[in-house]
Image (cartoon, grey):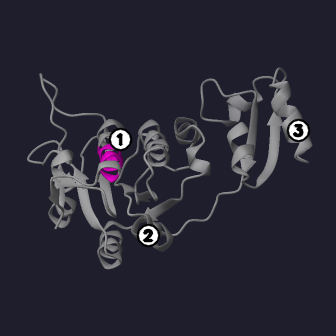
Amino acid sequence: MAEALDAGVGIDGVYAEPGADEALLRRCTEAGLEVVPVAEGALRKVLDLVSPQAIVAVVRQAPATLAAVLADSLERRCPVIVLVGLQDPGNAGTLIRVAEASGCAGVVLTEGCVDVWNPKVVRASAGSVLRVPVVEGAEVPGLLEAVRSAGLSTAGTVVADGLPPESQDLAGAVAVLVGSEAHGLSDYVQSAIDVRLMIPMEGEVESLNAAVAGSLVAFEAARQRRVGGGDQAIN
């Protein structure tokens, strides 16, 4: 709720159970918002959360377009995170949060991904979903064509036969594709992208959580922007 107020998004309704944070209630009132009291436990019945906060808001989704996100990536020379078939809300929300923290232009969710306004996604994003441009429902072939036409390079996370992120130049405008938890990126996507990235690991671990892998690539790109690029340009 506080994140929504700070972000300045349109708020259509506020609902509060007994025990809601008094300071937050005052902020809502001072902002001219009507707070509707509801019975204790009511929010848990309507939200897909085990322990929702005692105050929630209905906010208007900020419009974002693929063209605008790609243009911003080119202008600021920063990545776009693309979630391909990612269905776990915790992973999706985390990567939206990572996109903001690592300076990405936005996040694109393809068809088959979790709903970005799933309450678990919103919670995992820690408010970033209110500030980061998010595009939903992109078709993979059309998305790849749009990315190429805009002039971005493409990189995707894989579990085998990939290159270390630090060995590739991720400092510019690049679409970083992260696949689903169960299947990763399809053979079609892997054959269509410029470079496949694999996180070097030790021990018996076969793969990383999708959000962890995507986070490592996003922050490697941020590191390279600070120091001037990786070892080899993506062609």
Q: Nearer the viewer, residue 227 or 230?
A: 227
Q: Are marks 1 and 2 in contact (CB under 8 Å)?
A: no
Per the image, the residue denoted by label 2 is: 75
Q: Are marks 3 and 1 in contact (CB under 8 Å)?
A: no
Q: From where the camera sits, is residue 179 visible?
A: no
Q: In the rendering, at what x and y percent does residue 6 appear? A: 72, 44
Q: From where the camera sits, is residue 116 visible?
A: yes
Quadrant of the drawing holding the C terminus: bottom left
**The magenta segment:** 217-225
Query: Label 1 amino acid?
Result: Ser
Query: Label 2 amino acid?
Result: Glu
Q: Mark 3 vs mark 2: which is more N-terminal?
A: 3
- Asked where in the image residue 150 lies, by quadrant, the reply is bottom left
Q: Determine whether 124 is above or below 65 in the image.
A: above
Q: Which mark is residue 215?
A: 1
Q: In the rendering, at what x and y percent does residue 34 appear? A: 90, 44
Q: In the rendering, at what x and y percent does residue 224 appear? A: 29, 50
In front: label 1 or label 2: 2
Q: Crowdedness of circle 2 by 10 Å Cα count: few (<14), some, many (20+)?
A: few
